[in-house]
Image (spheres, rainbow, N blue to C red):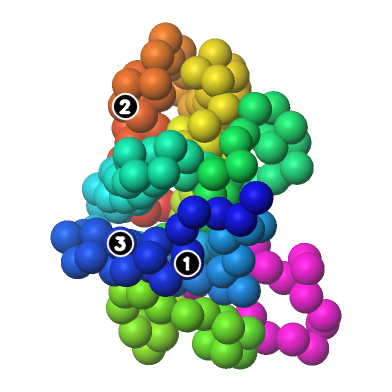
Amino acid sequence: MVKPYTWEEIKFFLINELKKTKHIMTFGTIGSCNVEHDVDLIITKEPKSKSSAFYKEVHNLFWNIDKYIHKKYGGRAVFISGDEKTLKNLANFGKKDLFFDFMVYTSFPQIENDWKWAMFYEDKVEDLLFKEYSLLKGEKELLRDKNFLKRRYGDSLFLYMYHGDVINSQISDNLILKLMNSLFDFLYRKRLGLNPPYAKDKKQVKKYFYKLCDIIDSLENKK
């Protein structure tokens, strides 16, 4: 079955939604944007913005895309990071659903750490990014902003968070709670030495996720 929508339609919707955002520095795609398979997204944060404010915009944008596709076509927008094959096997996705693989970064060193393992030694992350990144918001030169280029104390923790973020994955609520509570247990307890919260619903998942963003941001002033 051919999808009832085109990438151009989804792209037009995204561009209009992105005009409302303040904390997303760049938003774009990499790859073919084949709606029959999936669309790869790269999203970066305004250096001066709080990470929690940035992630709230990202999650709200994801929710709005899902709402649009569900209302108009009866499909869902499925946002996956990390182990795509496993997550796709954990839910009964429909033929009208649109899959997005998303990458979320709060600094350029995060991109380098996230990509290097899959690149040849002589390849440069910056060259590949500037060649392949197709923007719907922002300009590529913003990726060279001196503040975005800074390595942050909590970079590795934010990478772990985005890889484990299944909030908009369309898998069951019970599984979302299980996976996100596991993420909270690891980061709050093992990495930050704090008592981990236990989310009982998706609203609490978001609450503890954004709280974690603020905690990691605060580490920058204490290092």
Residue at the far right: name it.
120
Considering depth in this image, is 173 or 24 the residue closer to the camera?
Answer: 173
Lateral position of residue 10 relative to residue 170, left or right: left
Labelled disc at residue 13: 3
Distance from Cα at disc 3 to Cα at disc 1: 10 Å
Nearer-N-terminus badge (3/1): 1
Q: Residue furthest top?
A: 200
Name the residue located 47 percent from the left edge and 44 percent from the top edge. 77
**Horizontal relation, residue 114 to residue 174: left or right:** right
Distance between the alpha carbons at the discs numbered 2 and 3: 27 Å
Q: Which residue is mark 2?
A: 207
Which residue occupies 58% across, 83% down?
A: 132
Q: Which residues are magenta?
A: 107-125
Q: Quadrant of residue 112?
A: bottom right
Return the residue at label 1. 7
Three-letter residue code for mark 2:
Lys
At x 78% / y 68%, what residue is drawn? 118
**Label 1 is placed on what type of residue?**
Trp
Label 3 neighbour load within 10 Å: few <14, some 14-19, many 20+: some
Residue 123 drawn in magenta: yes
In-image side of 8 versus 87 (left or right): left
The answer to whether residue 138 shows anywhere in this view is yes
Task: Check if residue 124 falls in the magenta segment.
Answer: yes
Q: CA distance from mark 2 to mark 1?
A: 32 Å
- Give the answer, above or below, for where 171 lies relative to 141: above
Judged by depth in the image, the label closer to the viewer, 2 or 1, is 1
Question: 136 or 126, which is in the foreground?
Answer: 136
Q: Report x, y in % for residue 2.
A: 61, 56
SS state under label 3: helix
Mark 1 crowdedness (10 Å alpha carbons): few <14, some 14-19, many ≥20 = some
Q: What residue is shown at x 57% (from left), y 60% (from top)? A: 35
